[in-house]
Image (cartoon, rainbow, N blue to C red):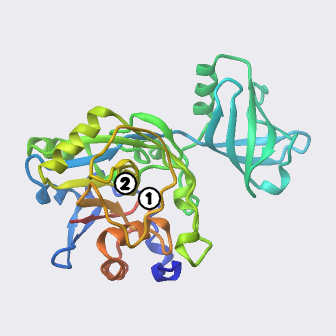
């Protein structure tokens, strides 16, 4: 399989700038792998495709406000700092992306507040836009994190050209988000409302949770034509014993098991053993799933519509078949489905 096998024309106006008015009223395209048929529904209709004792698996990661703006010492130039991951809690060292990167060198200092209460020093270069920063802050770790939260902005994807609005703090977060650590939302889960969760519960459908802290690597463009040469960036996964047991029970009972989102699917496929059992897992994954791939746990999935040549469209093509997915995407463009983080959803059965 080559990167160009996953290219298609995506009109710019189909990239969603805002979420649907109500979470569960985004559109839903339903793909049946067995019959190779496509239906057009609303997201809240998802409940009709599942029965008692079927299982939904959610990624409960929580997005933190990862985008900060600082000023470079001496010149005062405005610099965007995108927090990627904390490297050392004690010394407050973080991996970040900076923009514009050409102005930021080792030894530079960035000031984030008028009173200079939060300052960062550049201590290393990592990639072209990547830097390692040491934050200088006079206060406890809790106060430091509170300050980052206070100054940070919801990290909407770059393709959304509008300014961040107050509602984004809530809408770019799933309603079941618990474990802080993601710099991008697990977007398939954004469609679940409290009301829909209640309806699923009343129907007797079970829930399990895994944690995969979404990093920006998920969205990195693939710059090689040969997929086997692409390297994914690592993301952290946590699956506890209790949830592993709930998942294994549903698999053993041959229930419909639905992975909500590509991040959930990546977590499951990383931690599944050769005998199709999920084990408790606490570690990192750089698993890249593309066709052909045999899936070990979920037999259905919910996902948003992804951009051309992305690692995400490759994963769902591995799950549903490349030809069927490319046909469905052609249909999605024709029917003007909204794409990407705030866009519409797809259920693959």
Residue 72: percent from left, percent from top: 83, 42
Mark 2 closeness class: few <14, some 14–19, many ≥20 residues within 10 Å: many
Name the residue that disc number 1 marks. Answer: 341
Q: Which of marks 2 and 1 is in front?
A: 2
Left or right, residue 156 beside residue 49: right
Q: Residue furthest right?
A: 74
Residue shown at 53%/73% (left/top)? 227
Q: In front here: 49 or 150?
A: 49
Per the image, label 1 sits on a secondary structure element best described as loop
Left or right, residue 288 beside residue 347: right
Camera sees residue 147: yes
Name the residue that disc number 2 marks. Answer: 269
Q: How far apart are marks 2 and 1 (CA)?
A: 22 Å
Who comes first in sequence, dot 2 or dot 1? 2
Mark 1 closeness class: few <14, some 14–19, many ≥20 residues within 10 Å: many
Residue 73: percent from left, percent from top: 87, 39
Residue 298: percent from left, percent from top: 26, 56
Per the image, label 2 sits on a secondary structure element best described as helix
């Amino acid at each position: 399989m080559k990167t160009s096998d996953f290219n298609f024309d995506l009109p710019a106006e189909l990239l969603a700038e805002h979420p649907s008015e109500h979470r569960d009223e985004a559109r839903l395209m339903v793909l049946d792998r067995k019959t190779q048929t496509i239906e057009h529904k609303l997201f809240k209709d998802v409940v009709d495709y599942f029965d008692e004792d079927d299982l939904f698996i959610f990624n409960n990661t929580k997005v933190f406000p990862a985008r900060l703006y600082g000023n470079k010492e001496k010149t005062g130039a405005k610099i965007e700092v995108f927090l990627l991951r904390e490297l050392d809690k004690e010394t407050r060292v973080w991996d970040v992306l900076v923009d514009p990167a050409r102005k930021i060198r080792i030894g530079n200092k960035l000031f984030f507040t008028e009173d200079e209460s939060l300052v960062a020093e550049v201590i290393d270069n990592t990639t072209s836009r990547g830097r390692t920063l040491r934050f200088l802050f006079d206060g406890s770790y809790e106060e430091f994190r509170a300050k980052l939260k206070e100054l940070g902005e919801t990290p909407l994807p770059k393709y959304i050209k509008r300014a961040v609005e107050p509602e984004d703090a809530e809408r770019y977060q799933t309603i079941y988000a618990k474990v802080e650590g993601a710099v991008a939302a697990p977007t398939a889960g954004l469609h679940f409302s409290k009301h829909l969760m209640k309806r699923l519960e009343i129907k007797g459908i079970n829930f399990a949770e895994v944690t995969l802290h979404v990093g920006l690597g998920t969205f990195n463009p693939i710059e090689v034509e040969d997929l086997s040469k692409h390297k994914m960036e690592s993301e952290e996964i946590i699956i506890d014993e209790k949830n592993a047991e709930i998942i294994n029970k549903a698999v053993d009972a041959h229930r419909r098991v639905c992975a909500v989102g590509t991040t959930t699917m990546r977590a499951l496929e990383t931690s599944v053993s050769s005998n199709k059992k999920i084990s408790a897992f606490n570690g990192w994954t750089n698993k890249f799933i593309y066709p052909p791939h045999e899936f070990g746990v979920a037999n259905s999935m919910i996902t948003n519509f992804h951009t051309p040549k992305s690692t995400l469209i490759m994963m769902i093509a591995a799950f549903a078949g490349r030809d069927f997915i490319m046909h469905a995407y052609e249909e999605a463009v024709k029917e003007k489905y909204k794409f990407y983080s705030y866009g519409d959803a797809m259920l693959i059965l």
